[in-house]
Amino acid sequence: MNNPETYAVYPIGIVRSKLRRREDAPRQGSEGAPDAWLEIFPRFRDALEGITLNSEVLVLTWFHLARRDALKIHPRRDTSKPLTGVFATRSPDRPNPIGLHRVTVLEIDKPRGIRVQPLEALDGTPIIDLKPVLSEEGDA
């Protein structure tokens, strides 16, 4: 890469899930992903203020096990489908492996974090940010 600009991204927490291997994870949360804990590091826990039970949150993760050299893939690993640029897919393999997950808050435990569902991220996946899902009125 010849881009002189780089940006630092720091994890705010870690996903705790029963999913341990990529091959065990559904492709999307809606395809049978389990609930999981978003363990938020102590210095960021005050930032959970305002998140409520049953609210929807966007979880941004860093797919630390992903290939960063992938530019084209067969969608959903189906070789009968033509190669497609990763920017036109939801593949975790991409130059900047950022995951985007829409989840519902099931439990809030401020000393630990929040339990959410569904989440297809693997146990140990770094969390890089949380954002509320905005209503039609554009709150938050």
Image: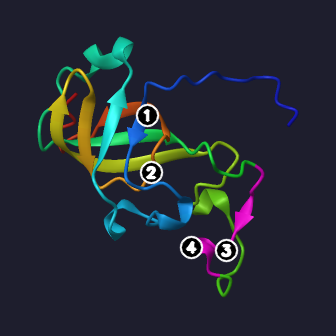
Q: CA distance from mark 1 to mark 2?
A: 10 Å
Asked whether residue 68 appears in the rendered view, the answer is yes
Q: CA distance from mark 4 to mark 3?
A: 6 Å
Disc 4 and disc 3 in contact, CB within 8 angstroms = yes
Rendered image: mark on residue 121: 2
Residue type for callout 4: Arg
Query: How many numbered tags mark residues here?
Result: 4
Mark 1 vs mark 2: which is more N-terminal? 1
Label 2 environment density (alpha carbons within 10 Å; few <14, some 14–19, many ≥20): many
| Between marks 2 and 4 in the image, the one whose residue lies nearer the viewer | 2
Could you say where residue 81 lies in the image, as x and y percent from the top left? 65, 83
Residue appearing at x 54%, y 22% in the figure: 10
Residue designated by label 4: 76
Residue type for callout 3: His
Q: CA distance from mark 2 to mark 3?
A: 20 Å
Decide: is 70 above or below 116. below
Q: Which residues are magenta?
A: 69-78
Residue type for callout 2: Ala
Mark 1 vs mark 4: which is more N-terminal? 1
Residue appearing at x 43%, y 56% in the figure: 19
Does residue 42 appear left or right of residue 90 in this picture? left
Residue type for callout 1: Ile
Mark 1 vs mark 3: which is more N-terminal? 1
Residue designated by label 3: 74
Label 4 environment density (alpha carbons within 10 Å; few <14, some 14–19, many ≥20): few
Does residue 4 appear left or right of residue 124 in this picture? right
Disc 1 and disc 3 in contact, CB within 8 angstroms = no
